[in-house]
Amino acid sequence: MAPSQMGKETKQMTRFQDKVSPDWFGWIVFLFFINLIIITLPLFRGVMIHPDAPVYLWSAQSLEQGNIQTAIQAYPMLFYPFLVMCVHKLGLDWITAGRAISVAASCLAIFPFLSLARRFSSGWPSILTTTLFILLPQYNSIAFAVLRDPVYICLALYCLYFAIHFVEKPELKGGISVILFSTCLPLLRVEGIVVSLVILSWSFVVLLRHLNFSRIMWAIAVVIVLFFVLFYVFKVSDTVWNILRISKIVTYIQNADSMPNSVSYYLTMLGDLAHNHVFAGPGNNFWQVIQRHWPWIYGIGMFYMFEKILGWLLVILGILGLRFVIKEHKAGLLLLTVFAVNQLLIGATYVLTGAMEVRIMLFPAILWLLFAGAAFQSTADYLNKKLGTHFVQQKMYIIILLTMLLTLPFAYKTIFMKYRIHIPVLRDACLWVRNEILSDEKDWSISVNMRRMAWFLDRRDVLQNSQIDSQQILNFLSNKQQSAIVILLMSRRRGKNVSLMKNLIELESISSKVFVDPKDKKNFVIAVWRKKE
């Protein structure tokens, strides 16, 4: 074979190997577009807005009008509503503006995550870990929604990426990036305050270790000055306290020595059950065991939500990868500290409020994926030492098998996820009520069974009651001091709902209107109202 021909084949082989290499730059482009497709596909199915979306949109509307206090009343943490307001000024409607921000944040989050994954698990495990992040069902269920969570997760990942980069290589540019992103996190979620404090404190200690004595004194002096400036701002500005929810945090701290109301209420109920229940025995019955070990119950609840997001296999792999990350990586302890502090604050909030949504656990679950990715590498290295050459030859098949085992369940859940599909009759009914009934006077008392109705009604003072009870509806309408209206989304498939609808429209003391959609065989809306005499 001629030397020139051999050179061409060698060049082609090298180029081919580069393209299938896990370090190939094209992977980030490929994963980005896959992520974009997964996030935007639900929007073509006509997904309904999230129940929490109206409060962000109302806050954004108030900001556009220049009414800061009204914006804070709608939703105090103004960073996300401010972004919605800015995008709305580009010509998009409010809901589209909110969704555009969420989609953009969800797509941009892949860049810091892949960089972190490659830092803690180089090679194919980093690609696998990023693929799991892209397919994470709980994340994809809100990645397009008008919510602050996608923006918070995106900025938190960037903040952590710059912090870890700064720990490994302290530079002024990296330090400024850490400060900028750390400043944004407290404006989005309460957990962001603690996460920012941990990252900033860690970065400051790293900075001090690379300075001489005189510069250390200057750095400490600057921090002290900034502390007093912030203290003064918090002291004189109630707006800042409300935006960061400092007053709420202070209230929790002041009541830390007393039992939270959510806990004491249930403990009282458990005490009654323990002594008065039919199965109550002389001691250690079911209710007493729960009563005595209630902190463990909350811990189990947190773990259940955590496992629901990731699954048992990734939880176990993350445990195996913990030791590798801390031992082999300079910034591994920072990653673990951010995860642990985040979980502690979530647990404290869980106990204080008595309830929590699964999406609150998303950020720590995403961090756990990095530990799981490190377990892939450490496990492969261990097997390579034990099994030798035979394992190296079969390594690609093992990677393919592991990839399918981990990604297929996530892909299935994401593709066949049951989203809250938009119900046109709900929107149309609320718009009719808004234009035909509520326009004649302003002192209407309104009750609905879905929070989203408040957005279409353009009324922030609605009462939400998810329970549909005929007597409760009549009691609400019987108030003669003001005009009252009840709007209910109900199902045609439920006999009780259809029966209630017939009973309401037959009442002569109230007016009613039923809204149906010929294309919708399941839902209908009924509005019943009574004007003040």
Image: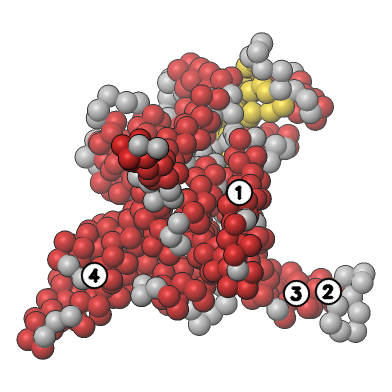
Which image quarter is the C terminus in?
top right
Measure the C-alpha gap from mark 4 to mark 2. 55 Å
Cα separation between marks 1 and 2:
47 Å
* Residue at figure coordinates x 21%, y 63% from the top left: 174
457 left or right of 294 in image: left
Residue hosting label 4: 169
| Percent coordinates x, y for residue 336 in the rendering | 45, 72
Residue on which disc 1 sits:
400
Numbered disc in front, either 3 or 1: 1
Q: Residue furthest bottom?
A: 213
Q: Nearer the viewer, mark 4 or mark 1?
A: 1
Question: Quick check: can you spot residue 105?
Answer: no
In the image, residue 500 above or below residue 373? above
Asked if disc 3 and disc 2 are in contact, CB closer than 8 Å, the reply is yes
Horizontal side of residue 104 vs 385, given as left or right:
left
Task: Tell whether 79 sits left or right of 177.
Answer: right
Secondary structure beneath label 1: helix
**Foreground: disc 1 or disc 2:** 1
